[in-house]
Amino acid sequence: MLERSTEIIEIDFDEILYLRGEHGVIGIVKAGTGQWFIETDDSEIVLFTDEDDLFVASGFGTDEQMIEGVRCMLYLVREIGSPLIALPRNHPASGRLRIVVSAGERTTIDCKIKPGTHPEQDVLCGMEEFDGMRITGVRGGVQLQNIDLGKIDIRRSRI
């Protein structure tokens, strides 16, 4: 039987939290107070974040190149202000995306959705080992719920 639990992990604003599973990696950083843009096929959505909100990146792979890609993607979004992109549901690029990003107070990982097609920022495509995991920004850290800690390597580094 899977041992799924809740864990709170402290992270500073200049840190990234990595969760590496067997097939994918999740990167998490504090978003901080700000204004961000989500671009869809027909509109631009303005998203406002608070101090403890998060950017969550999901990478489909686990090698060091993917981990560096997740770090770079989070840097581009938070530090450079690159917009988040939401593709139409049947867009051919969806299957080629290797990293997807969400922003907000909480994100639920769902392995059954198409990558990059959800402008709602509370759900993010991820690999099976993360399916159903909820990631919530809390004061000074991140709360992880519904996670099998026995199958996940957790580490932090500077962003």
Image (spheres, rainbow, N blue to C red):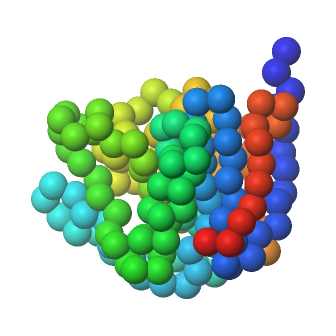
Residue 148 appears in the picture as rendered: no
147 vs 46, left or right, is right
List x then y, in percent, for residue 68: 53, 56
Residue 154 appears in the picture as rendered: yes
51 vs 119, left or right, is right
Which residue is at the far left? 42
List x then y, in percent, for residue 121: 45, 56
73 vs 2, left or right, is left
Q: Nearer the viewer, residue 132 or 26?
A: 26
For the point 34% across and 63% down, the residue is 84
- Count of numbered circles on the image: 0
74 vs 11, left or right, is left
Give the position of the C terminus as an image quadrant: bottom right
Which residue is at the far top? 1
Give the position of the N terminus as an image quadrant: top right
Q: Nearer the viewer, residue 75 or 87?
A: 75
User: Which quadrant of the structure image shows residue 158?
Assistant: bottom right
Q: Is residue 112 above or below residue 43?
A: above
List x then y, in percent, for residue 58: 52, 47
For the point 76% across and 69% down, the residue is 11
Q: Nearer the viewer, residue 19 or 125?
A: 19
For the point 74% across and 76% down, the residue is 12
List x then y, in percent, for residue 91: 18, 38
Q: Is residue 143 above or below residue 124?
A: below
Q: Is residue 155 above or below residue 78?
A: above
Q: Is residue 81 above or below residue 10?
A: below
For the point 52% across and 36% down, the residue is 61
